Image (spheres, grey):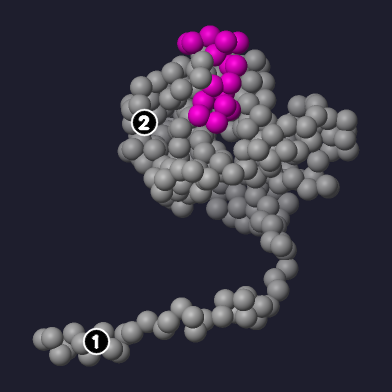
């Protein structure tokens, strides 16, 4: 038996990592053209979704910041950091719609772990900006239930890794309830929070879990990369009748960009894939 194991080990020995030239390998890969892939909720790929949509007049089609994507009027706009852009979008929607509320750990008077909700508790009160116990499964379920009764909750996970503790609520309730109820309920809830490798956090706080959550039927997932699309996606997610998970990266929170003064809302149904 020992001889057999030694033989197997010898035959399956790994190539030393020093024998692989990663730079040469990358250089040998042929260049690929940059393309735009649009995948709609009916799982059909389209190239001009928003041009055929009745909502094209009110939505900015490309959820990516580039010189051509930002309206010319934004030159007279204002500069914000990404976390401030998220707060702007949330603040505008709370002012526009009294059904919008926020809940999560330290989102109230502390202003959130990354200050996305700073000042909102003082402006809107403790009932609309609700501090919760450290119990992700409980307050996520509470937010889903609130959405079923007509509110539009924005649930903050202090860290996206912590939302693994709420995976049961997100999978079995948030994504399914509209369908298992025969369409009797809509779940207009936004679940958002930071993730990714940071400067001082441990492994449990540094995960990117998009692949976990995007596999759940009934949930839309989006990720912001600039202040411009962070604000537009936040507003679009809050207005959606579907549950939306908004992913944020901790290393992008201090990214600065000039955004328009006028209101804009991005599309949740079109993604632009950018390659260098």
Q: Are marks 2 and 1 in contact (CB under 8 Å)?
A: no
| Residue at image mark 1 | 8
Towards the viewer: 267 or 73: 73
| Magenta span contains residue 118 | yes
Badge count? 2
In the rendered view, tell whether residue 119 sits above or below residue 159. above
Towards the viewer: 78 or 215: 78
Q: Please state the horizontal and vertical placement of residue 232, each as a whole percent of the image.
A: 68, 34
Towards the viewer: 269 or 32: 32
Horizontally, residue 82 falls left or right of residue 103, namely right
- CA–CA distance between discs 2 and 1? 46 Å
In the rendered view, tell whether residue 89 sits above or below residue 223. above
Q: Please state the horizontal and vertical placement of residue 134, each as a whole percent of the image.
A: 35, 26
User: Residue lying furthest front in this view?
Assistant: 200
Name which quarter of the figure residue 118 lies in: top right
**Is label 2 or label 1 in front?**
1
| Magenta span contains residue 198 | no
In the rendered view, tell whether residue 88 sits above or below residue 12. above
- Chain part drawn in magenta: 111-127
Q: Residue at x 49, y 22 (%)?
A: 107
Q: Please state the horizontal and vertical placement of residue 152, each as a whole percent of the image.
A: 52, 22
Q: Residue at x 60, y 10 (%)?
A: 123
- Magenta-highlighted stretch: main secondary structure? loop
Answer with mark 2 or mark 1, whichever residue precedes in sequence.
1
Q: Secondary structure at mark 1?
A: helix
Is residue 82 among what the camera can see? Answer: yes
Is residue 150 among what the camera can see? Answer: no
- Residues packed near mark 2 inside 10 Å, few (<14), some (14 to 19) or many (20 plus): many
Q: Residue at x 55, y 49 (%)?
A: 42
Q: Secondary structure at mark 2?
A: helix
| Residue at image mark 2 | 136
């Amino acid at each position: 038996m020992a001889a057999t194991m030694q033989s197997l080990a010898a035959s399956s020995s790994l190539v030393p990592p020093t024998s692989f030239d990663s730079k040469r390998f990358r250089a040998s890969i042929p260049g690929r053209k940059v393309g735009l892939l649009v995948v709609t909720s009916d799982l059909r790929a389209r190239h001009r979704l928003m041009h055929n949509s009745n909502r094209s007049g009110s939505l900015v089609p490309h959820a990516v910041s580039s010189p051509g994507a930002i309206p010319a009027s934004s030159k007279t706009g204002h500069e914000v950091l990404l976390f401030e852009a998220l707060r702007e979008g949330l603040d505008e929607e709370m002012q526009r719609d009294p059904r919008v509320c926020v809940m999560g750990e330290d989102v109230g008077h502390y202003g959130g772990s990354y200050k996305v909700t700073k000042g909102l508790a003082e402006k809107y009160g403790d009932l609309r900006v609700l501090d919760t116990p450290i119990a992700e499964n409980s307050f996520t379920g509470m937010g889903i239930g609130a959405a079923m009764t007509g509110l539009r909750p924005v649930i903050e996970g202090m860290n996206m890794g912590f939302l693994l503790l709420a995976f049961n609520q997100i999978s079995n309730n948030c994504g399914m309830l509209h369908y298992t109820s025969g369409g009797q309920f809509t779940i207009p809830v936004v679940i958002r929070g930071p993730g990714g490798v940071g400067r001082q956090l441990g492994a449990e706080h540094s995960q990117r879990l998009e692949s976990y959550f995007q596999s759940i039927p009934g949930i839309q997932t989006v990720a912001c990369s600039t202040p411009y699309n962070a604000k537009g996606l936040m507003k679009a997610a809050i207005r959606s009748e579907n549950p939306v998970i908004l992913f944020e990266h901790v290393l992008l929170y201090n990214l600065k960009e000039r955004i328009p003064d006028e209101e804009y809302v991005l599309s949740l149904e079109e993604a632009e894939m950018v390659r260098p």
